[in-house]
Image (cartoon, grey):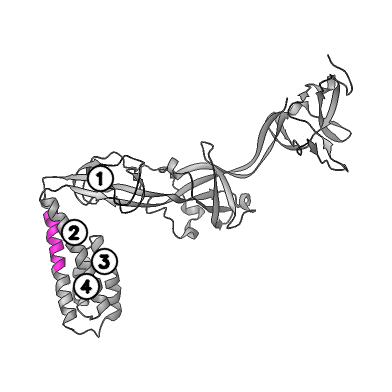
Amino acid sequence: MPERSVLYKKSNAEGFVIKDEVVYKAEGSGQVNKKIPEGERVPVGTEIAQINSVKDTSQLMTELKEIEDKITVLLNTEVAAINGEDSSDGDADYDSFLEDIQSNINNEKYNSINENKDLLQKKDSTSDKTLIEQSLESLLEKKEFIKKQINGGDLRFYAKRAGIVSYEIDGYENVLKPVEFENYTYDKLNIKTSDNVKSDNLDVTVGEPLYKIINNFEWYIAVKIEDAKDIEQYKIGQAMTVELEDETELKGKIININISGNNAVVVLYLNTYLHTDYNLRYTPLEIIHSKRDCLKIPSNVIFEKDGKNGILIKEINGIVKFKPISILGEEGAYTFIDFGDNNGYIQLDGEEKPVKTVSLFDEILYNPSNFSEGEILD
């Protein structure tokens, strides 16, 4: 009997997962106490981890001294600005530096502030003083944070965004980012394994990755395609279906197509599944161009009669009958055929009317050359 099956048209590709994820680093040294298990989704404000501070505070004391020096610099700068010192020179350099000052402080690049101390004292404007005040506030917060560490207080880390908590840091969080999708080209996507994954690390130092929070509602796959001809039929805005190694099918929306000679990269937007495999980064996959429900029969039962492909079946009354078929494709020793409309009729080339084809419950005869149409079998 025929088997119900699905005929796929696929092509091989590689997938690189792009996620909206933020890595949070340890702001102190010591032993980590993880409050949230790996893979759990948390709302904003949830306590994620706690660091029990170490006894050696020499590094913290040095950092505290540097921060106090920078606070002094900024306080002097604010006083100079209020007093209306000369602001006629260096406007462009000053404006550019002020835009960077907050970032430099947050990233602990304190030397950048010392190098431009004179420049900071040349401008008097309300907006500039606001930036200085914001920088001072940030430094003061860091100062109190470090003082608490020195005094032996435990450091607590809370979720600043909702999402899935993961302690596996693979180093590509700032490489495969959901921005500038036009820059994801064939030559640039070479990641296949993540050798530098951090997980279950109980002792950390200042600045070491501690955990990350992943937005599992929106994510992307950059599909790397060797032959650009495989995607000629696709356009931005259309859907594309891909199949992962575990046969999971995902349908995404095409938001970018980057052609590089004979190669291509298609970037898909998705909003399902990631919670199932939130640490997925690289995966071989297949693009499913089409799939069609059909019947599958052995190829060696097919023969030609009057220019039509068909098979012999045994009807309920034992009579041998020829039934035409419409071949959709082949795979190994099997052929996929059209099962027709709701009544089992197919339209053949050269025929004015649809003809009855094979049904799911027909008994197919092997070795059709051993039988004759109209023959009655026991």
In primary-sequence order, the first of circles 1 and 3 is 1
List the residue tagged with mark 4: 116
Q: Whole-percent x and y of residue 295?
A: 71, 32
Q: Whole-percent x and y of residue 3?
A: 69, 28
Residue at disc 1, secondary structure: strand
Residue at disc 2, secondary structure: helix
Q: Nearer the viewer, residue 170 or 138?
A: 138
Amino acid beneath label 1: Ala
List the residue tagged with mark 1: 49
Residue sitting at x 23%, y 41%:
33
List the residue tagged with mark 2: 142
The boundaries of the magenta stretch are: 59-71
Tell me whether circle 4 and circle 1 mark residues in contact (CB < 8 Å): no
Q: Residues within 10 Å of mark 4 (few under 14, many from 20)?
A: few
Q: Is residue 164 visible?
A: yes
Q: Is residue 179 magenta?
A: no
- The disc at residue 102 is 3
Amino acid beneath label 4: Asn
In primary-sequence order, the first of circles 2 and 4 is 4
